[in-house]
Amino acid sequence: MTPPNHDELVLHEIGSLAKPEWSVKPKRDDPLTEEDIQHAKTWSQRLGIEHEAKPLLSLLNTKRDGFTAQEIDQLTSYASLFAIRLQEHAGLDWVYDGEQHRSEMYRYPVTHSEGFQFRGYCRSFDNKYWNKAAVTNEPSLTQPYHTQEQDTIQTHANKPIKTPITGAYTIVDWSFDEHYLRKHLHEADIHPGTPQAKQAQANARHEFTIDVARNLIRPNIQALIDNGATWIQIDEPAVTTHPDEVPLFVEAFNESIQGLTHQCRFSTHICFSDYNNLFPHILELDGCSEFALELANRDSWKQGTDRDTRNGYHMLDAFKEHDTNAAIGLGVVDIHTNDIEPPNLVADRIRYALNLFDDDPTKIWPCTDCGLRTRTWDISHKKMQSLVQGANQVKQDLGL
Amino acid sequence: MTTIQPLLPGTYPRSQTLVQTTRDYDRNRTTKETLHEHQTRDTEALIGTQTLHHYPTPATGHITWQDPFRPLTPLLNNIQPDTLTRFLDTNTFYRQPTIQDEPTLKADALPTFLTRHAPRIPTQNGLTTLPSPTAWITANKTEHDTYPNTEHAHTLARTLYPTLLERLHERGTRTIALTDPWLSTHPNPTPLLETLTPLHNHHDTPHTLLLHLPFQNATPHLEHIHQQPLHGTLIDLHQTPHDALENHPTDRALGIGIIDARASLLEREDLLIATIDETLETTQPHTLYITPTGPLEHLPEPIARKKLRLLGQTAHTAQRKLQGDHA
């Protein structure tokens, strides 16, 4: 799919969308319910894809459980189709399939890489847990893990595709280290709690991160480009968790895309943290076209384009102050609430940011705050429609 | 001669079975009785492992606690669990205990708290970790870098803690670790530390009171901490330099966090022993507690169990070595 020839107010979603039960349950060997079947029927009608979805509906009409591996793959492919049409129908410029092929952004890449072993559940919050892996050997790749997904998406998409991938720093930060620490601490006979131990830990972390960037991320990116990718978003939600490690993120990002910057558009997504910690280090990023930022979550819902009203967007000051030579992926839709942002509010948020960046629409690319996977398709669709309608108001202002 | 003991302050991780059972319970797939049965099993297994590995002061591990504050907020008027907040620089989140007004005790909620969240300790010589009164303030940093009024910590120290400590004593707790992982992130923690004074003065039960400062460099605060009416301090030796221990008062217990509570790699015992030796060359407290650098809940339980055992073994070996050296 040829990318649009404009870079003004580029509209996109960040990554994940909810997975339909009719795709998830068969993987768990849970039987489908009438409600699950109805979901597929309703959405095929809402999105105007009854004809495309006909084989899916036929399959779901014939069986509720006992799906074969081939049928499960078909269901995933249809989930991918629906998620893409959801975004296209809403009017976004660039689309993706909302991670319909992936378990989630950590487990999927780690499961498909060599050198990691899952160690068990760690608490995320309340009674929610996640399965955390440890690196036990130098990470490597048996084969690129996103190209099959890309093949399916390319088959379905009518709009250009932006592919999100989990970045090296986040994979490292969310994993235990039993390989590099052993080498730098134990094999060097370093006592815990000494200054030498701190330095050894830093060296281990650096080596681990660069190995992931070089051995896992770059080959995946190369494969995606060879397969036709034109925009790859490197997701790094963990990057500002350790402000002192932002330089390590920068080094890993550059290592991940080394030699590839002229073959594809690269961007990064960072969320739910203090973006001031990124500076000045991110000025050293090589070939990053966009910083996609969560911002709406911090903002008021009042109408207005003045600074006091748009209190969630003050974090943009640092991006204005430094010339990052990249667009802002402007989060204008909160992913944590079912309330739908009115288009006028979305428009005001975009107008505020535009005003800050000299009314240059190539600097502001409106998007959702983060992936919408915790919202229903109905809420996600309405939020994306509101995003588009709000952006269209601004486009009209600017005569675009 | 210094007595060397292993100690497990803070929350211990749930077993993989209990994680699954809790998930099933939350999704109405299992009963409350099954959940309670598995919670009890986890607690008993934890105490059993500590007993087996020579922990003189075993902890129940707060298996049912969702974060350091949640079980306690129902005991208080004017404090509510609120915004999900990142716990330091980890990938675990807690709910900030938002203080709306002067907190007061809901005494009638105590029995439920004790039944659900404070199991009896069979040895009658147990350890319970509670958030330090200071933590109710330091854990509550807002987006605009402000904190609640320090006076609320004084109020909590006068109202909640004396009653709580008394009831915990009845259930076998003899040592209390007052934990504050955020103390060093507060811009001016010195006045906050004064809130510990009424805790010591007002309770009649003979608890050993320890201030627990996990995951932080305690150096800037140690001098002032030593002036507080406490029986000892537990510090993270990965973050706090050795030379900060030089002025540790010998009449107070010292705890050194030497097992990394956030790394799955199991430590080498010989290197741990060497670190203990270095500590004892710097200071000779009457009791030296060997601890993890913070609560082990940041590890999957099978790994936490290995570290728990290693901690016990290491303290045992170090004590024997010290006795041998002494002889």
Image: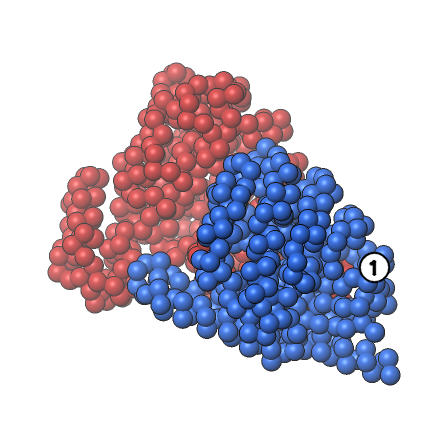
| Amino acid type indicated by mark 1 | Pro
Q: Name above or below for residue B45 compared with residue B193.
A: below
Taking B259 as reference, is A84 left or right? left
Other-residue count near label 1 (Cα within 10 Å), few / some / many at <14 / 14–19 / ≥20: some
Residue lying at 45% horizontally and 21% vertically, measured from the top left: A351
Identify the secondary structure beneath mark 1. loop
Q: Colour of chain A?
A: red
Which quadrant, please, contains the N terminus of chain A? top left
Nearest the viewer among A111 and A197 is: A197
Q: Viewer-proximal residue, A19 or B269?
A: B269
Q: Position of residue A358 (x, y in %)?
A: 53, 19
Chain letter of disc 1? Answer: B
Could you tell me residue B187's position as x and y percent?
Answer: 70, 39
In the rendered structure, the answer to whether residue B261 lies left or right of residue A118 reads right
Residue shown at 52%/47% (left/top)?
A: B105
Please count the marks in the image.
1
Residue found 49% across the figure and 43% down from its top: B77
User: What residue is shown at x 68% (from left), y 45% (from top)?
Assistant: B195
* Residue closest to the eye, A206 or B162: B162
Task: Check the image and name the residue furthest to the front.
Answer: B204
Point out the image quarter for the C terminus of chain A: top left
Residue under circle 1? Answer: B249
Up/down of B213 relative to A184, above or below: above
Tell me the colour chain B is drawn in: blue
- Viewer can see residue B93: no
Q: Nearer the viewer, residue B178 or B308?
A: B178
- Residue A209: x and y in percent read 61, 55
How far across and how far down the image is residue B6, in percent?
68, 71
User: Does residue A175 appear in this view?
Assistant: yes
Above or below, B61 relative to B48 = above
Left of A191 or right of it: where is B84? left
